[in-house]
Image: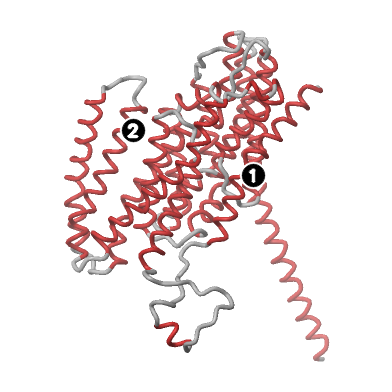
Amino acid sequence: MSTPVKKTENRYVNDLRRYGYVQSVFFGLRGVIVPLGLSIIFLAVVGSTVGGYQSTISEDWLIVAVAAVVGGYMALNIGANDVANNMGPAVGGKVLTVLAAVFIAAVCEAAGALLAGGDVVKTVSKGIISPGPEVSVMAFRDLMLSALFAAALWINLATILNAPVSTTHSIVGGVLGAGIAVAGFGLVNWGTMSAIAASWVISPVIGAGLAALILYFIKTRILYVEDRLAAAKKWVPVLIGLMAGAFTAYMLLKGLKKIWHPGMLEIVLLSIAAFAAAYAASRPYIAARVRELANRRTDINRLFNLPLIAGAALLSFAHGANDVANAVGPLAAIVSTVQQSGIAREVTIPLWVMAVGAFGIALGLGLFGPKLITVVGEKITRLNSARAYCVALSAAVTVLIATTLGLPVSSTHIAVGAVFGVGFLREFLENPNKKKLRPGHKLNVTAEDAFKSRGYRSMRLLVRRRFAVSIAAAWVVTVPASALLAALIYGCLQLL
């Protein structure tokens, strides 16, 4: 009797295992099919809407509809990949859940794109190459379409591989490769390319330096003093005021330019006023919070939760203003050739073009962004709310400066540079006068003496070096890869 019972039990166990496997496969497929299906619906709506509208006013409606779909595809990929660099610190610092981060970023990305993205769009669509009479209108359209499609494909592949890459690198490489395929190296505006390349190097350095400087200030003035509560009560409102002043300055410089053009004196005075108002409003809030906390660093870190959320929102706004150019810059250039029957010197950005980029980024973030948000927030170095606040504020200020100058800098470089800046500062401060023991290195002391010795204590590595190598490799490969793809796509278009 025991044998049939055992067989029955084994059959039930196998059935349960098969059921569990089928269930896991189903939920896995649902996690892929649902976002993919919603993305296809979004692109179909973009294509049909733009095509139906353009067919009533232009005979070139098909190229505009196709470019709009590719622009929407690019925007989805930007939301899936690049926005992770903005919200990752807040998630890594355990201040926001992934769902809350996605919602905040989606709103702020769309607002930044619609309110403050125009100047950078002009840089991407007209600054990298200088088309002359040798480039026909049709060739220029194929050039921009090839660049846009190549960049989108490359970012899509990187997202599948969980690699946060620069969307700015991708689109600039695409325009560069397609431009060379059209008319050779002489078509490229090497002066603009040099300025853009310089910004790629400078921006992560500035981001790292600012993040390290802010963290150093927080550590020396708040976290590592005897009375942390009193220090926090004094300095945290100042940090909140600085953020408010920076955001106000940016809005006056860029966000409100369509309805108001204030002078520099007005910008300075209003930014100071915003700093004072935020400082005055945050003082009672911080004072009330301090009374509920113990004099421990872990408790003090919680005071940075609200500033971190504000900083992440600011960074997302700046990212939308800057990186919408990557999605719709080439699309705007194509639309301008239809509206003006030629390659125009000045590109007017229609509202619907900006909307495609803004809502595409927000949708891509919601559908595909959570996974990379988690990767960016937790893999490079360990973050808490104070460190994440430094990363977010530093990256936001750097992106805002770049956007003000009209440079399409890489937010990936800035955010990752800021994370590394925080991590390496911690290593420097927490490892004074320590030497890292190399593999195979022997000392004429006991293990206990070696551990206690300041001269030979093993250095704590608070930044994962392998990520520095992989990130650097991704940065190096992105431009030539997208350029090669764009050249190949342009060649295929000429065969059609």
Q: Amino acid at mark 1?
A: Val
Q: Residue 183 at x, y = what percent?
A: 70, 20
Q: State the residue position of label 2.
A: 250
Q: Position of residue 443 (x, y in %)?
A: 50, 83
Secondary structure beneath label 1: helix
Q: Is residue 286 left or right of residue 146?
A: left
Displayed quadrant of residue 46 = top right
Q: What residue is drawn where x is 70% and y is 17%?
A: 139
Q: Is residue 334 above or below residue 133?
A: below
Q: Nearer the viewer, residue 135 or 22?
A: 135
Check the picture and name the quadrant holding the N terminus. Answer: bottom right
| Among the two numbered marks 2 and 1 on one chain, the one whose residue lies closer to the N terminus | 2
Q: CA distance from mark 2 to mark 1?
A: 33 Å
The residue at the point 38 percent across, 35 percent down is 401
Label at residue 477: 1
Q: Is residue 28 above or below residue 75?
A: below
Q: Please state which of residues 229 and 285 is positioned toward the viewer in this rendering.
A: 229
Pick the quarter of the image with the C terminus.
top right
Q: Which of the two residues, 249 or 285, is positioned nearer the viewer here?
A: 249
For residue 202, which quarter of the picture? top left
Q: How is the image coloured?
A: secondary structure
Q: Residues within 10 Å of mark 2 (few under 14, many from 20)?
A: many
Q: Is residue 102 left or right of residue 4?
A: left
At which x and y percent is residue 266?
A: 22, 26
Q: Which mark is residue 490?
A: none
> Is residue 44 visible to us here?
no
Q: Are marks 2 and 1 in contact (CB under 8 Å)?
A: no
Tell me the residue at 60%/54% (across/down): 470
Query: What amino acid does circle 2 point to?
Result: Tyr
Left or right relative to 411: residue 473: right
Few, some or many C-alpha atoms within 10 Å of disc 1 (few <14, some 14-19, many ≥20)? some
At x 53%, y 31%, the residue is: 194
